[in-house]
Amino acid sequence: MQDLSHFAKLDEPIAAIAHAVYELVAEIDPTLHRMKRWGFPGFVGNSTIGTVCGHPHHVSFQFFYGAHLQNPAGLLEGTGKDLRHIKFFSMADVARDGVRDVIISAIEYDKTLRDEGLRARAEI
């Protein structure tokens, strides 16, 4: 079972939003392996797909190769070489148009990456 202790440190409603984002990714692809990455609950395949990070006033889903993803709805933010994120300020943000599409795109992109062996170390 994935270590979700990071969420217990968050105040409401941020903790509930973090759980909802996590469950959305798990629902989209229940076969994804889960692994704590840099202290945050995350999803791995060939590489790290993303992590759910709670902040005082929002939740971010960090896409580790987000710069390589399509962003037609303009949801991805960031300027790093690879990392991008979507911010969630409310439960309604979790259901925004385009969120599922970006997550699916990240899962598909991960399949093109070199296998780093993370699945063998994942919790599930």
Image: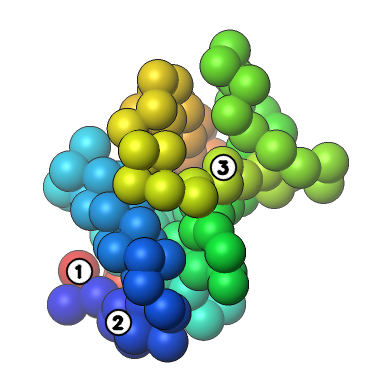
Pointer 1 and pointer 2: residues touching (CB < 8 Å)?
Answer: no
Who comes first in sequence, dot 3 or dot 1?
A: 3
Circles 3 and 1: CB atoms closer than 8 Å: no
Residue under label 3:
86
Q: Does the image show residue 28? A: yes
Q: Quadrant of residue 16?
A: bottom left
Location of residue 97 (image quadrant):
top left
Q: Toward the viewer: 90 or 46? A: 90
Three-letter amino acid code of the residue under disc 1: Ile
Q: In the rendered image of this protein, does residue 15 appear above or below residue 107? A: below
Q: Which mark is residue 3?
A: 2
From the viewer's perspective, is the residue at label 3 or at label 1 nearer? 3
Residue 117 visible in image: no
Q: CA distance from mark 3 to mark 1?
A: 25 Å
Q: Amino acid at mark 3?
A: Ile
Q: Secondary structure at mark 3?
A: strand
Q: Secondary structure at mark 2?
A: loop
Q: Which residue, given by chain and number where applicable, does mark 1 sit on?
A: 124
Percent position (x, y) of residue 70? 59, 18
Vertical placement of residue 52 versus 121, above or below: above
Q: Position of residue 82 (x, y in %)?
A: 73, 43
Of residues 92 and 24, which is closer to you in this image?
A: 92
Q: Which dot marks residue 33?
A: none
Q: Which mark sits nearer the N-terminus, 2 or 3? A: 2
- Residue 38 on image: x %, y %: 57, 77
Q: Quadrant of the C terminus?
A: bottom left
Q: Circle 3: is it few (<14), some (14-19), or many (20+) Cα within 10 Å?
A: many
